[in-house]
Image (spheres, helix red, strand yellow):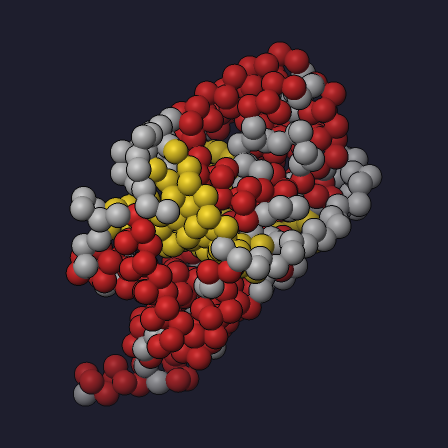
Amino acid sequence: MFITMILNHLSPKNFNRSKELYQIKFFEEKLSNGLHVILHQDKTTPLVSISVLYHVGSKNETPGKSGFAHFFEHLMFEGSKNIKKGEYFKYIAYNGGKNNAYTNHDETCYYEILPSDRLPLALWLESERMLHAKVDEESINIQREVVKEEKKMRVENQPYVKAISEIIPSLLFKKHPYKYPIIGLYQDLDTATEADYKEFYKTYYVPNNAVLVVSGDFDMNEARMLIKKYFSSIPKGTRNFKMNKIEEEPMKKEIFFTYVDKNTKVPGVFLSYRVPKLTDEDSYVLKIIDHVLSSGESSRIMKNIVNTKQVASYAGSSLDTMEDYGIFMIYGLINPGITIDQLTKIIDEEIDLLKEKGITEYELEKQKNCFEKKFISDNYSMSGITASLSHYYLYYHNADLINTDIEKYRKITTGDIKQVANKYLNKNNRVRLYNVPDNENTDK
């Protein structure tokens, strides 16, 4: 009897019903100034998650003015016309919340989580940031030193980071701004003027270049009224935000580079492939390949290269998906007694095996289950829902993908894996970088 009940619950009819439990309902509208608003109501817990996502990242910067988007991630916490210097974090902390921001190549996001009755506070703070941020000489000089110190700590004094964040992108991309580091270059930080920053702020941090998402416990009519109160009077930006498409010439041969890294004692190889943009169907397949290669102890790289052959002390892969292109990286750090060329050869053998034999149905099903679990998990928390709604609207112009995007993974076949691996994971489509210590002699 018990087994029959379980089987009935797992029938296709009930499975479809269980999937409906995870449907995220939301309301969308666009204000007259172009601000796109998405509201998801969930009264389960007395919290609200708020984010303002600006469609500006390092790719929107011009040569000689790198690091501006990341600089504004810091600068826009400095204060505003009606908020004293340093008080953004105090407002949030004193009201029992938390907040932060991030920048990447394509976007800058500011977000808060607060008790639900503090929604008006969060909306006021974000409207102040959008309309009245302090972009003055004093604030700029403070943050200039903060960013320099961050760059020194996180890039200049860390092993392998400069190779990954600066050298490899500059070799993979000849034309596209993805070749510049998100954090910027020292010389650009030193020469940027107050007028430069004011122009950047005036251009990109405007309502028609932003998505505002609120998720959680709130009254729908009240939230819409508050959003209009705080944001509707902010002037629309005048710029056409559609960028001219910058296309890279196809790579015709492997680019080899040796970077001498003062911060490391262990040589490493980084094989970086140029792959398509995040909305491309092949990007979904590449995510599966990335997981097959290096997600967990049973993944191919961990099992074969690190544990069985023991030629690498650490190895793996990563996929950085961006709006215009992506970077698929496979890397390893040598074990004692192994040369960097030997490790490269063994990694290449693993890649060739993937291209020739593909993966098993078991491996594919395992990864599909993993992505389905993540998909459900992302839709479980208010902050996860807020982030997903922003992401799907910004890049796909379809926020409802928060409910349906998993179907793209379910449709992937073992044939797709093999085809995509052969299409992109080729020596003539990559940068091979050897990251070596000072005075290290490596076989070329």
Residue farthest along the right direction in this orientation: 238
Residue 178 left/right relative to 162? right
Residue 397 position (above or below residue 157)? below
58 or 333, which is in the foreground?
Answer: 333
Image location (x, y in percent) of residue 217? 49, 47
**Residue 347, x across and y down, in percent:** 32, 59
User: Which residue is pictured at 58% across the width and 57% down the height?
Assistant: 251
Q: Is residue 259 above or below residue 389?
A: above
For residue 363, above or below residue 78: below
**In the rendered image, which quarter contains the N terminus?**
bottom left
- Name the foreground residue: 421 vs 95: 421
Q: Residue at x 28, y 64 (%)?
A: 300
Quadrant of the image occupied by residue 410: bottom left
In this rendered view, identify the residue nearer to me: 363 or 330: 330
> Residue 134: image x %, image y %?
65, 20
What's the residue at 32%, 46% (across, down)?
443
Image location of residue 176, percent across then percent down: 64, 46
Residue 210, by quadrant, is: top right
Residue at x 18%, y 46% (from the top left corner): 337
Q: How many marks?
A: 0
| Left or right of residue 116, residue 2 in this image | left
In this rendering, would 240 be left or right of 402? Answer: right
Image-based side of 279 in relation to 216, left or right:
right
Q: Does residue 38 appear in this view? A: yes
Which residue is situated farthest in the top direction here? 138
Query: Considering depth in this image, is 218 or 246 the residue closer to the camera?
Result: 246
Residue 17 visible to an observer of this rendering: no
**Quadrant of the rendered image containing residue 364:** bottom left
